[in-house]
Amino acid sequence: MTEQASPTAGTPARGYTWPPFEPGHTLSTKHAAYSPRRVDPLAAELVDQALADDAIPYLRQPSYRPALWAWGRAEARVQLLAEHLAEHEAGGCRGCDKCARWDEQLRKWESAAGTHRGRLGLDPASRARLGKDTASAQVDMARLLSGLDSEGSTDDRP
């Protein structure tokens, strides 16, 4: 009995091979919405734009960074998925299984981005609500402080 070479023995199948993937290749990337190489730079650009906006200076506080970054990543994924879906449909596709899955992912990320926008005050309604809540808290604090002052200014502590 003669031994046959195993398919994993390191010999080329059918007599041909491809060169190995080079570092940084994008050949296996489909729509890039989950590729940090594509998502992170776009998210950083969106975050930088928000930080530069003088209408929303509160976002510059360090405590907002994690939420702002989560918003930027969600918005970047929405943009990348929408672009890919548009390119795929422009190529002649009309509702294949891939389009349906990408469309479902797009809706998921649009919802997440909308939630983040609302929490950060990045849309008109949520910004107005945030401003109202902040003003209300300032009035309550002023009342509290004025109540402390009116109770007496003498120091009765032992």
Image (spheres, grey):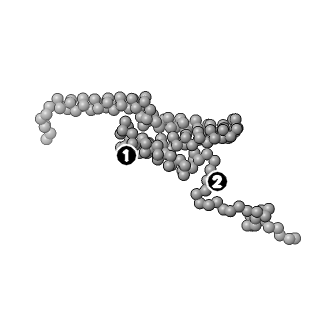
Residue found at x 57% / y 45%: 33
- Residue at the spot of label 2: 27
Quarter of the image where one finds residue 4: bottom right
Residue found at x 55% / y 49%: 38
Q: Looking at the image, which is closer to me, 69 or 85?
A: 85
**Image mark count:** 2
In contact (CB < 8 Å): disc 2 and disc 1: no
The numbered disc on residue 62 is 1
Specify the amino acid type for callout 2. Leu
Q: Where does the C terminus fall, quadrant-wise?
A: top left
The numbered disc on residue 32 is none
Residue found at x 55% / y 40%: 78
Whichever of callouts 2 and 1 sits on the residue coming sooner in the sequence is 2
Question: Is 151 located above or below residue 21 in the figure?
Answer: above
Specify few, some or many for label 2: CA neighbours under 10 Å numbering under 14, 14-19, or 20 or more. Answer: few
- Whether residue 32 sits left or right of residue 96 in the image: it is left
Residue 70 in view in this figure:
no
Question: Is 47 located above or below residue 148 in the figure?
Answer: below
- Whether residue 151 sits left or right of residue 7 in the image: it is left
Specify the amino acid type for callout 1. Pro
- Whether residue 40 sits left or right of residue 59 in the image: it is right
Residue 69 placement (x, y as % from top left): 46, 45
Residue 133 placement (x, y as % from top left): 35, 30
* Residue mark closest to the camera, 2 vs 1: 2
Q: Looking at the image, which is closer to me, 121 or 155?
A: 121
Question: Is 10 located above or below residue 152 in the figure?
Answer: below
Residue 140 placement (x, y as % from top left): 28, 30
Residue 27 in view in this figure:
yes
**Helix, strand, or loop for circle 2?**
loop
